[in-house]
Structures are given as C-alpha cells and as structure tokens.
Amino acid sequence: MLRVPLNQMLAIVILSLVVGLIANILRSDSIPILAKKISIVENLNDVSGEPVSITLDQAKNLFDKGVVFVDARDDQYFKEGHIPNAWNSGFFMELMFKLDSAQTKIGPVVLYCSDDECGSSEELANDLFNEGFTKLYVFKGGWLEWIKAGYSVE
C-alpha cells in the first residue's frame, strides 16, 4: 500500500486549487467566485438580459398582466400555499422545457421564494439565464411580502 506523507498530500491539494483558480481566471467563460448581486430595476422595459430584482408593486403589475410566476421554494411550502397560477420549480430540466414550450426563452418570468433572505429564486434565475432565458424578474419580497399585502393566494 502506497503511503503519502500528510505534508505532500497537503501540497498537492493546494497546488491543485491554485492551478484550478488560475485556469478559471484565464477562461473566457469563467465561473464567478462570488455570485453577482442582482440589481433592482425601476423600468421593466430596461431589462438587459440578466436577471433583475423587482418590487412588490412591479410583481403585482406583472401578475395582473398574466406573466408566468415560478415558486422556487420546496414542494412542501408550495403545497401549503403559493401565488395563484404559479408554477412549482420542481425539477430544473422539466421547468426549463415547460417554460420554453409555453412562451419561448424570451418571455417574461417572475421567480420568487419565501422572502428577501431566501436565495433560491436568485439561483434559479441565474440557472435559467445560463440556459438562454432573457426576461427574468426576481421578486425579492417573495411569498411573505405577497401575503402581507393581502393579495390572493392558492
């Protein structure tokens, strides 16, 4: 049995991390070390393709226009209550194909989770953006702000 001293193993791990980080930096399609903060948009027509954050009033406006809402919370929370007609995020590939077939990748989508502390909607928005979706609105106030406002729920 081959035994590698601990200090050599540690050196190999550190060297691997350094090489991996350098390779990532040099790539044209590098993976960000830290997630980009989603900016708040005042005019919904100013969406440049990357996901943006919207307010309760903007979310309600989009809801009234019939825009698709996607609940990024776990199935259990979705079953306990959600914004009317919202889709459950469920399996990512299934959601992606459902969205694409219902309205194509350029159609608007509002993503939400429980509140502004929940990051699931931002993660889902970034995943959808990486798959080519271009009008992604993250409703940061989410489910808790929606019910606090007294809007309808299912």
Image (cartoon, grey):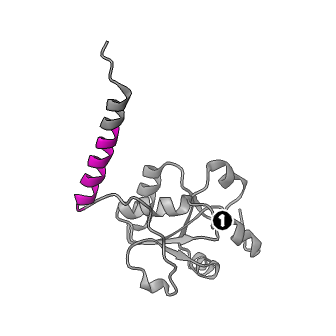
Task: State the SS at label 1.
Answer: loop
**Residue 93: horizontal and vertical position, in percent?**
42, 50
Name the image quarter holding residue 148.
Answer: bottom right
- Left or right side of 103 for 86: right
Quarter of the picture containing the C terminus is bottom right
Q: Is residue 58 above or below residue 3?
A: below
- Left or right side of 110 for 2: left
Quarter of the picture containing the N terminus is top left
Which amino acid type is marked by label 1? Asp
Density class for disc 1 (Cα within 10 Å; few <14, some 14-19, many ≥20) is some
**Residue 75: horizontal and vertical position, in percent?**
62, 49
Name the image quarter holding residue 145.
Answer: bottom right
Residue denoted by label 1: 115
Farthest top residue in view: 1
**Residue 79: horizontal and vertical position, in percent?**
68, 52
Q: Is residue 88 above or below residue 137?
A: above
Could you tell me how many numbered marks the image carries?
Answer: 1
Q: Is residue 127 above or below residue 2?
A: below
The kind of secondary structure the magenta stretch mainly shows is helix
Q: Which residue is at 41% across, 55% downward?
A: 97
Q: Which residue is at 29% across, 42% downward?
A: 15
Q: Is residue 43 magenta?
A: no
**Residue 151: horizontal and vertical position, in percent?**
73, 74
- Left or right side of 6 for 44: right
Q: Which residue is at 61% across, 64% downward?
A: 85
The residue nearer to you, when weighing 36 against 140, is 36
Q: Is residue 19 magenta?
A: yes
The segment highlighted magenta reads: 13-28
Name the image quarter holding residue 141.
Answer: bottom right
The residue nearer to you, when weighing 101 against 60, is 60
